[in-house]
Amino acid sequence: MNRTETIEAVRVDGRGVWIDGSPRTLLCASLFYFRLPREQWRERLEQVRASGYTCVDVYLPWNFHESAPGRWSFEGRRDVAAFLDLAHETGLYVIARPGPYICSEWDGGALPAWLGLDAELRVRQNEPRYLERVTAWFDQVLPLLAERQYPANGPVVMVQLENELDFFDCADRAGYVGALRDAALGHGITVPLIACSGQGDLAGATGDVDGVVPACNFYPDDDSPDIEAEVRRYAGLVAERGVPLLITETNRRHRTLRRLLASGAKLIAPYLQSSGWNFGYTPSTGNWGRPGNFMSHGYDFGGYVTSTGARRPEYAEAQVLARVLDTWGAQLALAEPVLPNDRPACDFPTSSVSAALAFPEGGRLVAVPHLGAEPGTTVVGGVPVAVAPGSCPLMAMDVPLGAWGIDATLTLASADLVAAADGVLVFSSDVPVTVVLDGTQAEIPVSARVTVAGVAVVVLPAAEAARLRSVDADGTVRVTDAPRPPAESAPTAVTEVRRRFDAAPEEPAGRHTLPPTLESLGVYRGRGAYRATTDLTGVDELLLTGAADIVDLSVAGRTHPPIAGFGAARRIDVGDVTVSVAIEAVVEIWGHANFDDARLPALRMGALRGLGTLWKVRGTTDVSALWTVHGHWAGNPSPTRMLGGWSSTRVAEPVTYSRTVHSPTPSALHLRGVVEPLRVSVDGGAPETVHTENPWVLLSAGTHQVAVTLPHHPSGPGLRAELLTLEAVRNWSCAAQNDDLLSEFAARSGPAESVRLPLALKPGEEAWLDIDLPPSPDGYLVRLDATQVRVTGWAGGECVGRVWTGDRPTFSGGDPDTLWIPPGWPGLTLLAQGVEGRDAPGIRTLWLEVPTG
């Protein structure tokens, strides 16, 4: 590859993005090969191209390709090279995002789980152990990208390093990003290197490293009037660095995308326009919604294509905007954001700051977002014009039309220009369009053709403009036929299944004094079992600490509700048990944290999974009193008060309370009533932050000086403190069931009996079910009519996903109640697990739906 030719082929500067020497405005859709069957890659890529978008951004998940240390795979659904080649054949550019961290609501943000087993390895840092592992990943993936850079052999026009590093507490940003940059250059990456900021900290995302272009991710409220003001500020900040405004992630609504365009964006990449699926054990657990929420099997945030490939109305909006970009071409790509001389006066809610683009050859494009729900009117250049609710027309003003062979100036057009030819202008609008040409003003109804100052002006409704095919030499406007709506089919009920007699095998994982992490047992995705026998005489409750992420616990045969506390301490009532009993815990990995959330231990980046430690609570003592007060005007001797009970006029100022606590065994200090985060220091050590999600501090045996510092909050609920003396449950027997073992078992046929639904299950009971699916070219959505059941499904030799019905944690993403079986993936096997809860576990019916696409 000739480095000079590649640099010339793709470059960025203060004016914009240049490809093959021409300025380009890029519309980019996220499309992830790892969330689709390989058989659908081409169809989805062609669907993006047909939307008018010219680019896709593609994460490359490290742990998808290195499923265990040193076990690499780039075959089948992991053949990213084939995916990139298909994108090239389809005519799409690609922005490749190899991480090493990607977020993407993916298991661990794509960082392999076993990295956390090395206590000295610090992820996402300029740290030798971590960078050594990153080097191994980059050695695998960067050559694939280098070979497919545009224009030599492929579509890659940019490579993103890391992802939203400004969300993470990186100690040496310049050193870390610099190391990634050097690795990329060393592997022959010559297209622009970019790094995106997630919360607007450009230096935090890039380390201000030379050769790394800062990009921005914006996720505003679509109805906010202040989008333009924020985006224009960042357009100015990156302009000072001599680069264009690249928006690498944003919302999916095209009204918002138009506002970003008019504010100066040269790359606009709404995140997840083309939805997909979280197969198997790949979803993350993270901080969407409440801390520790779960991602669903469906990965869909309302983009223009659903997870099953169906087009939403926003798809047509994409086609119209793409035609606007094509029509204005290089003028728009080089246009500069300006403030209009006269801000349009609107009788509807609109943006707080106007946005317009000045064309290099004269004239400008003015965005007028209508943020309301009723028809409205705005006055632009002294002319009142209609604006449809929910729209954002890009209105041309004072534009010479010589480029299209028209000897006239378009003084005003109140709608999107979607095509122009010799003597013909075509606009898209769902309300009448006002056009002023060389001083002649006309109002053109929708679906009409009117001659204005010798120019044929055609107004197409947006639905037709989305299907615009061509404008003939005689001015005839041609559109393609409207697509037929997909045929609806009634769901089919599954009334009979085959229940297997045998259970999935386990791999013995030894005996351990305390429960080890699943990753230390070689389980990076899947589940493991922990078993122990202990004497609970005199014990009324257990305390579970450090458990993650789904724990099904059984004590003396009694199944408890699932624990999904992600490391938060949980008290478990066992007061009715008085003898030596068997304890069993099955811990399932839903996914590793994709975001560094300090509120819960198991949501920290790199946190491991497993049972944690199970303690017998031997005693409980209230220690809310006898705390000495330090801070404010508390003098010597220090006052002795209740915890949080020092009155002061200095509201919100920090106050420190200290006292001595003693326990002959390990203990846990429980701070009840925590609202705002507070700091706890033990024996003068580094303070630990305690949150309302996990108001516990573990103490070793002995006497300790505990200091609690919190802002003075006289209106708060007050704090109570209790000390639990603990004894660890020891001598555990462990067994592993990683995802490979479970998938191999699911793919095997075994002895089974036919069972008619409904199927009742006991809490903790598991049933392996085989189901015959009739052939379908579109696959099936499997919807469960079930209560208190967790179901994992396999087809085609792969785990397709999981569904949890009944009492469950918060879910985000797509529909959490369905499994998708891709077409051509043979067989369907379900593992149904009864879950303790308000209702009795069971499956009433399974419904098969043919997805529309």
Image: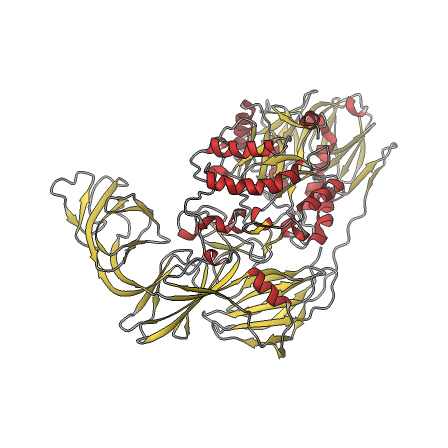
For this view, does 376 lie left or right of residue 630?
A: right
Residue at figure coordinates x 88%, y 32% from the top left: 474
Instruction: Look at the image and tell me whether residue 618 can be seen.
Output: yes
Residue at figure coordinates x 41%, y 44% from the top left: 120
Residue 389 picture location, percent across and down: 63, 41
Asked if residue 616 is positioned above or below residue 853 in the image, the reply reads below
Q: Quadrant of the N terminus?
A: top right
Colouring of the image: secondary structure
Residue 805 picture location, percent across and down: 53, 65
Residue 6 picture location, percent across and down: 69, 28
Q: Nearer the viewer, residue 339 or 760?
A: 760
Asked if residue 734 is positioned above or below residue 90 in the image, the reply reads below
Question: Which picture quadrant has residue 252?
Answer: top right
Residue 658 picture location, percent across and down: 20, 47
For this view, does 398 lie left or right of residue 510?
A: right
Q: Nearer the viewer, residue 80 or 242?
A: 80
For this view, does 301 lie left or right of residue 330?
A: left
